[in-house]
Every structure is written in structure tokens, then in C-alpha cells.
Image: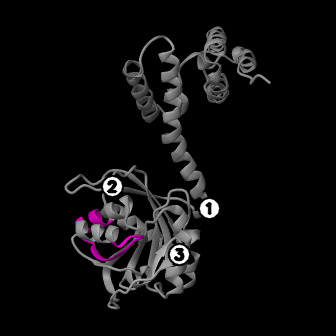
Amino acid sequence: MLMRCGKAVSHQMHMNTNKTQKGFCVIGCGRVGTHLAVHLTGRGYQPAAFSSKTFASAQNAAFHAGGGRVFENAADAAKTCELIFITTPDICIVPVCDQIAADGGFNESSVVFHLSGALSSELLVSAQKAGAETGSLHPLQAFAPYEPGQASPFTGINMSVEGTSGAASLGKKIAAALQARAFTIPTDAKTLYHAAAVVASNYLVTLEHVALALLEQTGLDQARAYEILAPLIQGTLGNIASKGSVDALTGPVVRGDAAVIARHLADIDKKMPQFSGVYRLLGQHTLDIARLRKDFPKEADQQISDLLKNDT
């Protein structure tokens, strides 16, 4: 029986009941699962078993990892080794884990991880009830489809680790083996951790899209607009890295230059009103940061605050 997010598909498949003590199993052989299998193998781990939504994707992962058996039934794959990675889409983690548990795929020797960024190890409750240690590993990385010979996407990145004590300890060792930098977070903080990553990455794209749109309004095309802003963006990120976010802040808000802010708002309200609210909201939070600076001219605080109030 092959798990498809809680739906079972019947197939006949030979089952291996010999558990590999130092091997690992990957359930869900998409981009992350395949990369994980290949690069863990490259760091001395043994690929024992693979199972996925399609038999072909599991075969592909096993081929690139250079070993391991392919199973139609995820529980049969899980029974072959103690280290089990569920690398399915988030929506499938619970039904896949529950089905493996129901089919006897976990026991007291199992250590089960999922790799979701947004969800915690609490999802793996059925594995934990079977006696397994449970945790989550999340590589802060965007994964392209695996291509043979490419550099490891894990090298030098940060990887969050949380879960039961045994799983968290092993998770840090796995991250180190992948040459990633592990950091631990409380299980109940996983959602905020992921929100921070979304703001830092996804919303940065949104922010720069707004900046590019404003500059395009001057007659520049987007490519040239980016060329102009890129050194400023990179310099700002460098300043945050070296000084911290408070001391890295520059510009009219922290200088107390209400006149410049007023001109910005007048032009944006007139020419690109779709961005008026964004400018004001970001300005309000920027003012909060500016107030933490000793050099912020407090006499300008109220005037800037009034300018940045959302129109109702």
C-alpha cells in the first residue's frame, strides 16, 4: 500500500525486514528528499530505503544516492532502519506519519524527522506514541531540482533543529555532517521562526518590488532600476550584519527630516497611491526603530508620527 496523503494505493512489493542500524530512510522523494539522500550519503550515511508518491521518484532518489531499496509501502521502508525522514509536502506529513504508525513502521528505536519550516515536530505524535524520538530539521535554503555533480545546497547554510532530546541531539549531528550550521529552537516557537524566515526572504522580495516600481515611475526599466538599487541593498544588508538593525538605520526618519517624508508621501499619493499604505506602515515601524537611537531628534517625533498615520 503506497501512501498518497492518506489515500492508499495497492501494489505488490517484496518487503525487507532486515533493519539497517546505520542507514536512513526517505519518505517523499521530491527536491528536498533527493538532495538530502544524495548529500547525506556523500557524508558517510547509508541510504537504506526510499518510498514516495510515485515509484519512479523513489527509484530516481535511490539511483542518485547510489543505493537503497525502493518500497511501495512507506511503512515497509521505515522498518528497514532507525533514522527516518518524512520529506513530503507539509499537508501530507500527518497522514503519511499516521499511516506508517498504523502499519507498524515505527518502534522504540526509531528517530523520525520531518523537514517542514512552518510546522513543528508535534505533528509526529503518532510516531511518538509508537515509542519513536521525533523532531524537525529545516534547512534555510531554496532547493532546485537535483542535478548530478552539483554542489551541496546544505553547505554553509543554517538549519533549525527541534524535537525530543534524542532527536534534537541527532539532528545537530546530521546538520554538522551536511556541513550546515545547526541551531535549536523551542518546539512551540517553530511558527514564529518560519514567519521570520518568510519576512526576511519572501517579504524582502515584495519590498524591493515596491522600490523598483517607484523607480520605474521615473522612466527607468526594471533591469536598470535594479542596477541602481543593488549596491544600496547590498550595503544595507552589510550594515545590518556589522552594526545590527538599529544602528544600520539611515534615512529621513532617523534624521527627523519630516519635510522629505512629506514630499515622498505627496508624490506617492498622487502618482502611485497603491503604495501609499505600504510606505506609511513601513515608516511607522521605522520610526519605532529610530526611537531606539540616542541621536534621533525627539522634537521631530510627533510630526513624523502624524505624517505616517494611515488615512482613514
Cα–Cα span, label 2 and label 1: 25 Å
Crowding around mark 3 (Cα neighbors within 10 Å: few <14, some 14 to 19, many 20+) is: few
Give the mark nearest the N terminus, 3 or 1.
3
Give the mark nearest the N terminus, 3 or 2.
3
The residue positioned 65% from the left and 8% from the top of the image is: 259
The residue positioned 50% from the left and 28% from the top of the image is: 209
Task: Name the one closer to the observer, 219 or 306.
Answer: 219
Q: Position of residue 293 (x, y in %)?
A: 60, 26
Give the mark nearest the N terminus, 2 or 1.
2
Q: Which mark is residue 7?
A: 3
Task: Name the one closer to the observer, 20 or 52.
Answer: 52
Residue behind mark 2: 154
Do tag 3 and tag 2 residues touch (Cβ < 8 Å)?
Answer: no
The residue positioned 42% from the left and 67% from the top of the image is: 171
Residue behind mark 1: 188
Cα–Cα span, label 3 and label 2: 32 Å
Q: Mark 3 falls on what kind of element?
A: strand
Cα–Cα span, label 3 and label 1: 29 Å
Q: Nearer the viewer, mark 3 or mark 2?
A: 3
Left or right? Give the position of 203 relative to 231.
right
Relative to 114, say whether 277 is above or below: above
Hey, what amino acid is under mark 2?
A: Phe
Q: Position of residue 23 (x, y in %)?
A: 31, 78
Q: How is the image coloured?
A: one colour
Q: Mark 2 falls on what kind of element?
A: loop
